[in-house]
């Protein structure tokens, strides 16, 4: 079963795994929050258009709250443009 992100009663993003680990792998970020290629995620991170990962060993992890905050900010920005 594919897990989907949800919108809470405040219109903000919350994940179905919000009670799980606060760290997300690249695959989880792309599957749950930002469905793009690994290269696009790397480019967005490098250009500071996406939260920076935390490097542990040879792997990158993202803080779940940082990703959710970023997604909520993107949604608010889109809503502001649409309502103008």
Image (cartoon, helix red, strand yellow):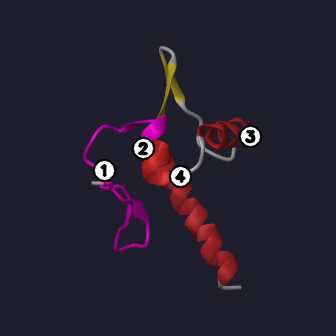
Q: The C terminus lies in which quarter of the figure? A: bottom right
In magenta segment, residue 15: yes
The answer to whether one can see residue 56 in this image is yes
Label 3 crowd (10 A; few <14 / some 14-19 / many >=20)? few
Label 1 vs label 4: CA separation?
A: 18 Å
Q: Is 9 above or below relative to 74?
A: below
Residue that label 4 marks: 35
Q: Which residues are magenta?
A: 2-28
Q: Which numbered disc flags the more N-terminal residue, 2 or 3?
A: 3
Which is nearer the N-term, disc 2 or disc 1?
A: 1
Mark seen at residue 37:
none
Q: Secondary structure at mark 1?
A: loop
Q: In the rendering, which numbered label is found on residue 64?
A: 2
Question: How far is the residue under mark 1 from the one under mark 3?
Answer: 27 Å
The CA distance from mark 2 to mark 4 is 15 Å
Does the magenta portion include 45?
Answer: no
Query: Tags 4 and 3 in contact by the CB under 8 Å rule?
Result: no
Q: Which residue is mark 1?
A: 18
């Amino acid at each position: 079963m594919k897990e989907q992100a949800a919108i809470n009663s405040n219109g903000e993003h919350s994940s179905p795994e919000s009670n799980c680990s606060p760290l997300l792998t690249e695959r989880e970020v792309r599957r749950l929050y930002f469905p793009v290629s690994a290269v696009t995620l790397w480019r967005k991170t490098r250009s500071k258009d996406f939260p920076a990962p935390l490097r542990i060993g040879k792997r990158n992890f993202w803080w779940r709250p940082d990703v959710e905050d970023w997604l909520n900010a993107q949604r608010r920005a889109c809503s502001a443009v649409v309502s103008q």
